[in-house]
Image: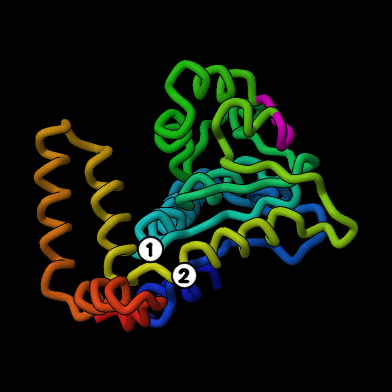
């Protein structure tokens, strides 16, 4: 279901920002179903985890900004799902951790790669080696999430913050948002000189757009721009 949803969003030009959330109170994503995993034989586990990894990669490769709204547990694959998003916000009561080593396995949905890229190698190793679970405040302190909120009565404080962020993103030029994300993502994987060349190539994509001219005109006419993603 997640894979189909991501496929639909990938090709929908009207989509400007994506929020990943759960409607289950107190749980963002609890990770693998261990009762199901027990029934699998060894030859089934590898392909199953590959499928999860592929879906999480698809989320990471979505062309528009993505925000994970963590209002509850995000453990194992659940945290890996959140790590694939551009921005993470969480309630202070949320619990986050890559707990796989407790089960004598390792994170298999990108966790060993995305966690160190997010919080640094040494801290990532500490968290994976210890299978430690962090609350929202601790996650904010190590840089795992960008914002931490006190949970509200409805249990959706992180989702509401994600909506606020999405509303901040919405007025900007859609083409610019997509190429900005591309430039940052690709640039982070290479040296600075190559990264600057990537930025130049991405900038070039915005120059011929109608939106760029609309932005300049709106500034001149002292009004809000009306961008169409063209």
Residue 28 colored magenta?
no
Magenta segment: 132-137
Q: Secondary structure beneath disc 2?
A: loop
Q: Residue furthest right?
A: 153
Left or right position of 176 against 156: left
**Quadrant of res 118:** top left
Q: Residue at x 85, y 54 (%)?
A: 152
Counting labels gives: 2
Q: Residue furthest front?
A: 221
Residue for badge 1:
62
Residue 181 in the image, given as x and y percentages of width and height? 32, 55
Which of the numbered marks, if any, corresponds to residue 9? none
Position of the C terminus by quadrant: bottom left
Left or right position of 142 against 25: left
Residue for badge 2:
170
**Sequence-wise, which precedes: disc 2 or disc 1?**
1
Q: Nearer the viewer, residue 73 or 193?
A: 193
Residue 101 in the image, given as x and y percentages of width and height? 59, 26
Residues at discs 2 and 1 in contact (Cβ within 8 Å): no
Q: Residue at x 39, y 60 (%)?
A: 58
Q: Nearer the viewer, residue 177 or 226?
A: 226
Q: Is residue 124 above or below residue 174?
A: above
């Amino acid at each position: 279901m997640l894979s189909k949803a991501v496929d639909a969003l990938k090709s929908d030009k009207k989509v400007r920002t994506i929020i990943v959330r759960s409607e289950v109170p107190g749980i963002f994503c609890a990770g693998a179903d261990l009762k199901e995993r027990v029934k699998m034989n060894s030859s089934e586990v590898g392909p199953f985890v590959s499928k999860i990894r592929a879906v999480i990669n698809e989320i990471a490769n979505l062309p528009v900004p993505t925000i994970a709204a963590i209002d509850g547990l995000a453990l194992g694959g659940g945290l890996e799902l959140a790590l694939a998003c551009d921005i993470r916000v969480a309630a202070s009561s949320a619990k986050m951790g890559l707990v796989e080593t407790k089960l004598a396995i390792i994170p298999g949905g990108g966790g060993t790669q995305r966690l160190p890229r997010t919080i640094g190698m040494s801290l990532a190793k500490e968290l994976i080696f210890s299978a430690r679970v962090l609350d929202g405040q601790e996650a904010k302190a190590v840089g795992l999430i960008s914002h931490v909120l006190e949970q509200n009565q409805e249990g959706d404080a992180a989702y509401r913050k994600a909506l606020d962020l999405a509303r901040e993103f919405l007025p900007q030029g859609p083409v610019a948002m997509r190429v900005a994300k591309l430039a940052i993502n690709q640039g982070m994987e290479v040296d600075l000189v190559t990264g600057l060349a990537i930025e130049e190539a991405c900038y070039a994509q915005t120059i011929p757009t109608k939106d760029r001219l609309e932005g300049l005109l709106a500034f001149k006419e002292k009004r809000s721009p009306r961008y169409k993603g063209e």
